[in-house]
Amino acid sequence: MVAGWVDGGGSVVGVEIRVDGEARVGEYIRDAGAPIVAGRWGLGWTASRRGFETTDGGMTWQKDVDLPDPLPAAQSVPVRACGPIGCIAEGWLRVGWGTTDLAKPSPVTPLRAARSLPPPLDLDCQPVLGAPAERKRLAAGSSSSTQRAPPALAVRQWSSFLAGTGVNGASDGASSELPPFAGRPAPNVPPADLGIGVESLTGVERSLRAVSLAHVYAWGPKNGDWDQRGHWEARWLWPWGSGADGRSSGAVLAPWKTMEAAKRALGLGSATTWLFAPGDDPDHALLLARHTVPATSTDAIVLESDRSPILVRRQDGNAFPEVEAAVRTNGYWYLSTAQLPGELSATVLWLVDGSIAREVARVPRAGFETRIPSRLASREDGRAVGLVVDGRPEEGGGTAMRWVVGIDLETGAVGEPERLAPADFSDRTVSLCTGDDTGWELDAPYSADVRIHIGPAWETTLKSALARMRVTRDRACVKMAFGSVDAYGASAAEALWMPRRSAVPSANYRTIDVSVLSAKTRYALRCGKR
């Protein structure tokens, strides 16, 4: 015999099909609320505190089961499930079936599984760039020379980028003086012109918050003629470098006719959020303008050192839905987004080729009310991109599972989910990467302490540590790291910029680059495992 359930608009009916083909339909309960069913068990919970339950796959239902009112905190306990021992629903745990004393509901008490602490990452470090050299290099920086206008196609694309809805760190007031970025002065604004700017303080990777990552400048005549005499450029910092590693696009002719059009395009005075995604090297980055009015949409802007910014659209010419993650590998950007309105729940992978993005593949997602955040990872051979999702902790333990679904970039084939090292690395030792390490490369918060030691006396723990890692099921290694130390203090510790004498490490001594934000300045360190 085969048994199952038929769900129609929230109402369920049990069905049995015998070996001889005879079908039997179970009892239909019109007012069973939103029933929960699993296997041969089911429970309906109505607004009148009456319940309906079945233990035979819906063939018969026991009616008028006495149930309590839903708990006000039920929304904080989103689990609804039934099984042999009872049901969880409306904030209550109902133990047992039938009208025995075991059926009395009890409030759900979340169980806290014992968990081991992830191992700290202790690093011995040396400054890479001393303060005098850094100041000299920063002082020598100047704005990019003005270039001629981008191709007509790019101008038309940018001219359509006018629907703004909000900006991080932006002011809609124009000024003759623009703020510096990453220790470098802003572009010079001619006396007869005014400038505007927006700053990105948020990364696509959610742990990059309240950190100045990129700045967009635009300047031109006070009244009109921006498409003739106006200019704009973008500047950014690679999270894994120092303050001396700032990059700039080319300063190109503005695609907007007036200052007001430029303000609308940059989202000044509205609800647009500017997000930043670092590339696989300092010379490449991605800016995302996420709009929320009238509907959620995202404009993607590809940045490359000393080249014109490129506005990217889907093949149909429209903006993206919300961009969840981005990664650059093998010379191309790949973006993941939610599905378009009216489509089945999925994560869609896009390949950016010039100013056009085309769909590569889509990975179906369960239709939960809360969408689980995901990341994109790359393989060292450039042949695949991985969709990485952190799952729920394992049963009986506190370790969160991490899964990856590989997508072949040539065929678009979606592989089976693979298990990766747990998100908190609590059951293994994390090493420093070498050029021979393989695995999925991704940026993610480092859940354990990252301790920095410089010299015999100075040490600190990085705040909001972010790591670029290579991960497999059996091992994980750190390739680069970023974090802050008293990021908004008045001055940085001398240890961060004053080189110290140390013993020459052996040839096989592994080291990584660590970027530290302190006193609004970034410092580059070269670190080995302690």
Image (cartoon, grey):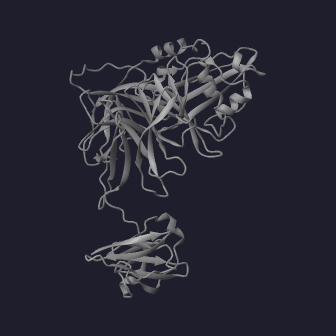
Quadrant including the N terminus: bottom left
> As drawn, which residue projects farthest toward the right?
223
Q: Nearer the viewer, residue 219 or 434?
A: 219
Q: Nearer the viewer, residue 2 or 214?
A: 2
Q: In the picture provided, is 430 more to the left or to the right than 25?
A: left
Residue at the spot 39% in from the left edge and 76% down from the top edge: 14
Image quarter hosting the C terminus? top left
In the image, what residue occupies the spot 30% across and 30% down? 380
The single residue placed furthest to the front in the displayed view is 21
Residue 366 position (above or below residue 96): above
Q: Does residue 58 lie above or below 266 as drawn?
A: below
Residue 191 is left or right of residue 92, and the answer is right
What is the x, y in percent for residue 45? Answer: 48, 77
Inspect this view and state whether residue 200 appears.
yes
Residue lying at 49% horizontally and 64% vertically, measured from the top left = 76
Residue 283 sits in which quadrant?
top left
Where residue 486 appears, x then y in whole percent?
Answer: 49, 35
Q: Position of residue 447 (x, y in %)?
A: 37, 44
Q: Nearer the viewer, residue 6 or 306?
A: 6
